[in-house]
Image (cartoon, rainbow, N blue to C red):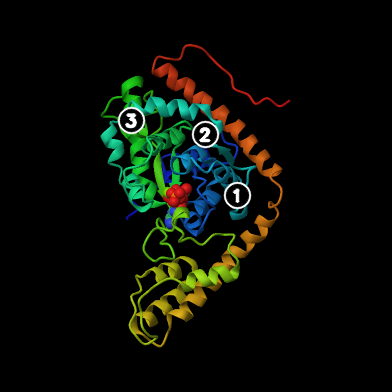
Amino acid sequence: MNRSVANPSSGSKSSASHAPGSQTRRIILTGDTPTGQLHLGHYVGSVKRRVELQDTHECYFIIANLHAYTTRADKPDEIRRDCLEIVRDHLAMGIDPRKATIFLQSEIPAIAELTFLFAMLLPFNRVMRNPTLKDEIKVKGLGENYSFGFPLYAVGQTADILSFRAHGVPVGEDQVPHLELTREVARRFNQMYCGVSDKTDDDDHVKLGGVFPIPKADVGKVGRLVGIDGVNKMSKSLNNAIFITDTPKQVQSKIGKIFTGRQSPTAPGDPNNALFQYVETFIPDPARVAELKDRYKRGDNIGDGHIKAEVADALNKLLEPMRQRRKQYEGNDQPILDILKEGSARAIETTEKTLALAKDAARFGFFKRRIAYDNR
Ligand code: ATP
Ligand code: MG
């Protein structure tokens, strides 16, 4: 896919407005469903970008645990465990909870309330036409038997993003259709309840009285890392992922499984195959990548096994510091729960403000309320 969706950090604001501590820092919302641990696809598709953005933007990272119930409602213990494991993965990959807010979706009432309202702003058929939903139904083998809540998660995701009035959403390319749905909801809300005209440019909605900025997807350089099956997107649910907790040996053996169909080191190979996506993504030296590509194409006595060993080596170099950092957070849940509680409290504060604005605009802002944790 081409990167036609603009990068939020290249918006019209000057760089001074991105300075840490500035009131006008632009807002980022993104996150993960706790359907397993984070893998290399998450890292290259979204988390690497999050680590950069946490220094310059107001970042909120959601653990979308309610969305995990759309396909795993019968496995509540696993979902709970994965929430904590994903936070550990975040910390290992370089997210700093002093810079960014990591929180649990289920702790944020405004998200559920806005989901209900936004569900009224989207035609049912529009939601069901979403290609990412259709693909998930197919790939996860959900058939006709998915829950009512399964397609509702696409609406819920619009609320995840808009309840923070986010400007940018760093995501992999599978999420772009969800972002498009979110942009439609934001426009419709601003037009229906805030008097914004349908001729208004996306960038001018808030200036002209809209509650919601029209958010932009920020697709990473590698928007879709293929899994070790060489076919599907690397995915927690498809058993084709390399996790950051995998040992060096596991990484070697998983990379060894990538199927290329090539017969011998002297057969000309296709440098657009799955193995070469790994070469291009993970071997850091561009000159070496170019050399490997050239020799592979010509069948210049270079075996797949040799290339796989180089890829595994590069991956293990990338993952080793993450594994080390992760160790500090293993074996004790309390520090992870503390991060989530603190982050959720901050997220409640931000989203309650948005909810109040949205309720006033949609004429059901009757009374003011305050939500707080009981700290006894
Ligand atoms: P599931 O199989 O449960 O849907 P997932 O592996 O697709 O899990 P998500 O939690 O849905 O993970 O995605 C979190 C973020 O990581 C999203 O922004 C998504 O686009 C990105 N992402 C996930 N897999 C990849 C991948 N293989 N390549 C690039 N980005 C990815
Ligand atoms: Mg997914």
Residue 156, position as x, y percentages in the image: 42, 34
Q: How crowded is mark 1: few (under 14 residues within 10 Å), some or many (20 or more)?
A: many
> Taking the image as drawn, is residue 283 in sight?
no
Against 302, residue 357 (above or below) is above
Q: Mark 2 points at which residue?
A: 24
Q: Is mark 3 on a helix, strand or loop?
A: helix
- Residue 85: give its label: 1
- Residue 187: give its label: 3
Q: In this view, does 253 lie to the left or right of 99?
A: left
Nearer to us in this view, 316 or 5: 316
Amino acid type, mark 2: Thr
Q: Residue at x 41, y 42 (%)?
A: 11
Q: Is mark 1 on a helix, strand or loop?
A: helix
Q: Which of marks 3 and 1 is nearer the N terminus?
A: 1
Where's the N terminus, which quadrant? bottom left
The CA span between labels 3 and 2 is 22 Å
Residue 169, position as x, y percentages in the image: 44, 43
